[in-house]
Amino acid sequence: MPKWEEHFNSWLEQTRFPVEIIQFEELKLNPEATFTSLLEALSLKVDPERMETSIKASSLESLSSMEIVDRTRDGEVISEDTMLFFGTGESGKSLDEELQSQGLDALFEKHFRPRIDRSLTKLEHFRSETGSKRRAIFY
């Protein structure tokens, strides 16, 4: 399997079909505009009612509820200490706090920050080359 950065770059560099990259932060900040951008990139008509339904169905609250229902249906007891896949949906949250560890944030920054920054810079360049009015969100 390729590394995450290699996988990301392979999508930016391929030319067989159009690529639209959406950042999680974009979806959080303005889901309507992000969905519209995606639909337009796919040459699909924007149906405001369907889009609103899709946004609600894919909201953190909806997905978290589905996860809890599925996991409890399978017999799992969910408590406040249970780590859920969907978590809080927050950006920039501390891994040290979430995983109750020490030094994981610093270790993550040391090993992944250069890759993340390179990828965000490439995304910014990619968007400018394709005429996108959206800017990469650096964090």
Image (cartoon, rainbow, N blue to C red):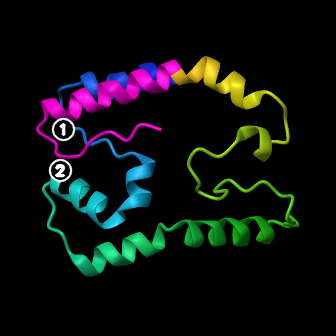
- Give the residue at x 40% y 59%: 29
Tag 1–tag 2 contact (CB < 8 Å): yes
Residue occupied by mark 2: 41
Q: In the image, what residue type sits under mark 1?
A: Pro
- Give the residue at x 17% y 50%: 41
Q: Identify which residue, 25 or 9, lies in the foreground.
A: 25
- Give the residue at x 31% y 24%: 122
Q: In the image, what residue type sits under mark 2?
A: Ala
Look at the numbered disc 2 and give the secondary structure of its residue.
helix
- Real-space CA distance between mark 1 and mark 2, rounded to the nearest whole angstrom: 8 Å
Asked whether, in this view, residue 60 is left or right of residue 132, the answer is right
Query: Whole-percent x and y of residue 67?
Result: 67, 65
Q: Earlier in the sequence, mark 1 or mark 2?
A: 1
Residue occupied by mark 1: 18
Can residue 120 be seen? yes
Query: Whole-percent x and y of residue 105?
Result: 70, 31
> Mark 2: few, some, or many residues within 10 Å (few <14, many ≥20)?
few
> Mark 1: few, some, or many residues within 10 Å (few <14, many ≥20)?
few
Q: Identify which residue, 124 or 61, lies in the foreground.
A: 124
Query: Whole-percent x and y of residue 19?
Result: 24, 38
Asked whether, in this view, residue 99 is left or right of residue 42, the answer is right
Q: Which residues are magenta?
A: 114-139
Chief secondary structure of the magenta portion: helix
Above or below — where is 134 with respect to 1? Answer: below
Look at the numbered disc 1 and give the secondary structure of its residue.
loop
User: Which quarter of the picture shows residue 113?
Assistant: top right
Can residue 2 be seen? no
- Residue 126 counted in the magenta span: yes
Query: Whole-percent x and y of residue 63?
Result: 58, 66
- Residue 113 counted in the magenta span: no
- Give the residue at x 43% y 19%: 6
Above or below — where is 104 with respect to 19? Answer: above
